[in-house]
Amino acid sequence: VSLCNYCNQKIASLVNNKMVCLSEEDIAKEVIYPGVVLTSIDVVAAPTEENPNRVTFSDLTEGTTDDDDALFIHNIREVKRQGTGFDTAIDFEADKLTPEEAFKIIGSEKKALFVIHGFNTQAGYHLADCLKAKDNFTKTNVIPVIWPSEGKGGLFDYRGDRNFSKAAGKALQSMKGPIQKLGKDFRASVVCHSMGNRVFRNFSDPEINFDNIFMVAADVDGDIFHEGYINGGSDEYRKHGLNIKGMLSDETGKIHVIYNPDDSRMWQSMIMNFGTRLGGAGVNFEPAWFGKTVHEDLKDSIVNVNSQECNMLLPDDPKDHNYHFHLEVCKYYDDNA
């Protein structure tokens, strides 16, 4: 499917497409996130007599390239901060949860919607971002997923985040057992933004299921779902596209590739990675040389969503990359999760 059916059914008004991204005023507010969060950031046990499950972590907690576990936490509370504006770094305390406790709190009244952030995004920013966006969701329950991004925008920080994102994906696989135990009683979908898609591709495992997968402004190889890329060798990374498809709960689920052809960050990433990025081009469904067309096993499971044609961008920012929480994008998740 290469046409956004959603656009045919419901043309959004550009005037009403509000931006949910954080302002410096939002960032200045104390971060308190009462809901459930999944984290691959290392936490430190810091129990008290009143709270034996207390843990601490920080925006400044460094990532590792051999991370192997993830943890559910909730009641995240800001302890202290340094810096101002977008350079703010926050120390947190939280309560750790077993997977069973987390799933009980999440409940089944609304479908869980896990949201994995991208490059240059600290935990505090993503939590505040999700908290601000929550009111735009009526059918799904947003569950932030945080991983140790440097929260900086330089070339070497980008390379570092690439390494940490791969390890974060492997760490999230530690949730496979608990999720499998829930069986069909637990229904969830997942949103991956920017480099969060790199986290997800390394997390991909057909034994873990989601009803729908939203790959937004995806900073991964533009060929990840193409025949030539997948059949070009036996390396693990070449099979990620098939693994992602295998994560769909059933044949009604889709991989929604939401992209912006003029995404300025995707142009930069294309130069840094020497190739087209999925978030700037979408998936090619037309016949092409050198296998640069969608793999036969995937073509019925992918929906291309051009954010420009679907009026998901703001009229004054056609090159936007951080549109994953714009109002019409949130509605798209809610309607299709």
Image (cartoon, rainbow, N blue to C red):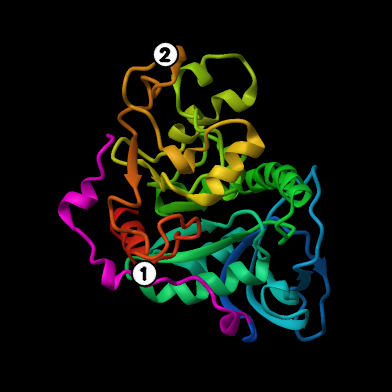
Q: Which residue is disc 1 drawn over?
A: 137
Quadrant occupied by the C terminus? bottom left
Q: Which amino acid does label 1 sit on?
A: Phe
Q: In this view, does 244 lie above or below 233?
A: below
Front residue (pair 103, 200): 200
What's drawn in magenta, residue-wise? 1-27
Mark 2 and mark 1 in contact? Answer it, CB < 8 Å: no
Cα–Cα gap, marks 2 and 1: 42 Å
Q: Which residue is drawn at 31% across and 35% down?
A: 251
Residue 231 drawn at (x, y percent): 52, 14
Task: Look at discs 2 and 1 and give the one toward the viewer.
Answer: 2
Q: Which residue lies furthest to the left in this view?
A: 9
Residue type pointed to by label 2? Trp
**At which x and y percent is residue 92?**
74, 76
Q: Where is residue 219, by image quadrant? A: top right
Residue in the foreground of this view, choosing between 304 and 311? 311
Q: For the residue labelled by badge 1, is the local secondary structure a helix, a strand or a loop?
A: loop
Image location of residue 118, percent across then percent down: 60, 54
Residue drawn at 74 percent across, 44 percent down: 159
Q: Is mark 2 on a helix, strand or loop?
A: helix
7 part of magenta stretch:
yes
